[in-house]
Image: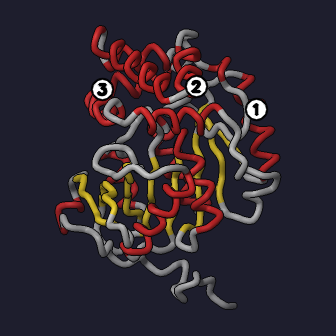
Amino acid sequence: MSTARNDTGRSLTEPAQGNLLDTVGERKRVLRIWQTARVGPATRNLEFMQFGRDGLRPLVFLHSIEYASAPSWGFCVDAAHAGFGTFAIRRPGFGASDRVDGADAQARLIDTFLEEAGLENVILVAVGSSCPVGYRLAATSPRVTYTVYINCVFNRDILEEFRPQWLAPIFVQALQNPAGARLSLEALKQVARTRSPGWLYESFLQKSPGDLTFVRTYLRDIEAAWETGSRIHPDTFQEEMRWSLQDDDFLTDGLLRSFRGIALSGAETTDTWKAGFEAEAKRIGVPFGYLPSGDIFAAYRCAGELLDIIRECG
């Protein structure tokens, strides 16, 4: 029986080579260290974290707007023991990563990073507002061989899902024009300054006991993620809101049927979210399932269960 290979001729079961863009060396075996690569002919900055020794299969996380950070140290250790090297990419417009316009441009830049780093047989985990970038990478990148979409909106109206109810008008205002996006972002920053980032997160995670537990357990990571996310340009904020609240023309019927992957949601969500999530997953042709705890933070709250799925299916 022949061995499956990608377009470079390497076996899909061969261990991956080291990251050619890595600058921290052996320290990444035990530490989560952010570093910045210069990528593509325009030498754009792209910030990333890599954990694990060279030769592990790349497990690449794309963050959502609410958590521009990496999986926990404990997850990275468990993933390394299971044969995966964890990468977290700060998407364009976040942290030290240069901004580009649109999901297509983000996907191209991240794919260029994967190519220049020499990464192959990649498992991609796209969370929340990064999913439009994940769809495009799954459909276009020969380096991505399995994709997990978590807490993905697809094409549906989710405004009624937001709690507390004062969040939805803030997000809608961000869609109107650049001034609206600037005002909406500033309103959220003002809440965090007046109360605290932890209070802000707990207010919009009130539907899910698992999410609340995650925030309280990893408050320092939450505060660091807020520090990064709150500094984005209003244009980036508007784009993230557009990807979350407006339909994506790229998501045609049956789009993902030919590509290996799974869509996951947290079990601690509403029946209306589940119904819309399942209907859209069927429409675009991707298998779906549920992580046992969490909602917005299900990917991180259920890290062990997520790793089991990746190990079994990827």
Q: Which residue position is annotated with label 1?
A: 276
Question: Looking at the picture, how far across and down is residue 248, in whole percent?
Answer: 69, 44
Q: Quadrant of the N terminus?
A: bottom right
Residue under the image location 38 percent in, 45 percent down? 93
- The three-letter code of the residue at mark 2 reads Gln
Residue 179 image point, x, y percent:
46, 24
Task: Return the x and y of residue 242 as percentages of the image width and height.
Answer: 59, 35
> Which residue is disc 3 drawn over?
219
Question: Real-space Cα distance between discs 3 and 2?
Answer: 32 Å
Q: Which residue is mark 2?
A: 176
The secondary element bearing badge 2 is classed as helix
Look at the picture and state if 281 lies above or below 208. Answer: below
Horizontally, is 259 left or right of 55 in the view?
Answer: right
Q: Quadrant of residue 223?
A: top left
Judged from the image, the secondary structure of the residue bearing numbered disc 3 is: helix
**What is the three-letter code of the residue carrying label 1?**
Gly
Q: As rendered, which of 89 and 181 lies closer to the eye?
A: 181
Q: CA distance from mark 1 to mark 3?
A: 31 Å
Q: Is residue 22 left or right of residue 302?
A: left
Q: Quadrant of the C terminus?
A: bottom right
Determine whether 275 is above or below 270 in the image: below
Local secondary structure at mark 1:
helix
Q: Nearer the viewer, mark 2 or mark 1?
A: 2
Asked whether the beta carbons under mark 3 and mark 2 sit within 8 Å of each other, the answer is: no
Contact, mark 2 vs mark 1 (Cβ under 8 Å): no
Q: Is residue 284 visible?
A: yes
